[in-house]
Image: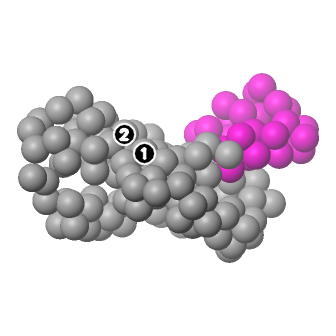
Amino acid sequence: MCLSLANGSLLYNFNFLDRIFNYSPTAYFALGFAAFLALNFAFYYFCRQIFLDKIKPFLATLVLATGYIGAGTFLEVYDSLTLFPSLAFIFLSLSFLINGLRKDKISFEIVASLILLAISIVALRVRAFTYIIPVLAVIYLFPGK
């Protein structure tokens, strides 16, 4: 199952997964569910860095999980296996960037943020051209000490 994206890139991960799972829908659903959980945990961690609270990040994650992005694309194998890991990496990247900017020096968090951003742009190329916008917004909103 070699699918092509509207961006022009090929989904090599589906060829790899086809060799492992064949055409078992249960395996793809389980993998999509794991990606869905990873996205929700990454988004919750990102919201914890912004709100510095416990209830607001939970409510924001609940909206993400039950809204169009979470529940709406969860049932589509293509979106859950490509979009969810990409968003999870970008939310973790932004979380590490916020932590690094609060320390007011080049730290492990900033380097980890750049590595996760590179992974989300290069390896998971779904809608990756817009990922620089949230990074610039975080740098603007959290300028450091």
How packed mark 1 is, by other alpha carbons closer than 10 Å (few <14, some 14-19, many 20 or more), is many
Amino acid identity at mark 1: Leu
Residue 108 sits in quarter: top left
At mark 2, the secondary structure is: helix
Q: Using the image, determine if residue 52 lies above or below residue 66.
A: above
Residue 129 sits in quarter: bottom left
Q: Nearer the viewer, residue 75 or 13?
A: 75
**The N terminus lies in quadrant:** top right
Q: Nearer the viewer, residue 58 or 30?
A: 58
Magenta span includes 8: no
Q: Nearer the viewer, residue 143 or 136?
A: 143
Left or right: 5 with respect to 49?
Answer: right
Q: Residue sitting at 77 percent across and 26 percent down?
A: 20
Q: Nearer the viewer, residue 42 or 27?
A: 42
Rendering coords of residue 134 (x, y %): 32, 64
Rendering coords of residue 142 (x, y %): 20, 60
Q: Residue sitting at 42 percent across and 45 percent down?
A: 92
Q: Using the image, determine if residue 38 lies above or below residue 72.
A: above
Amino acid identity at mark 2: Leu
Rendering coords of residue 72 (x, y %): 74, 69
Q: Which residues are magenta?
A: 9-36
Mark toward the viewer: 2 or 1 = 1
Q: Residue sitting at 37 percent across and 59 percent down?
A: 50
At mark 1, the secondary structure is: helix
Q: Residue sitting at 37 percent across and 48 percent down?
A: 95
Q: Main secondary structure of the magenta part?
A: helix
- Residue at which label 2 appears: 116
Look at the image and tell me whether residue 17 can be seen: yes
- Residue at which label 1 appears: 92
Left or right: 138 with respect to 61?
Answer: left
Query: Which circle's residue, 2 or 1, is located before the other in the chain?
Result: 1
Q: Residue furthest bottom?
A: 68
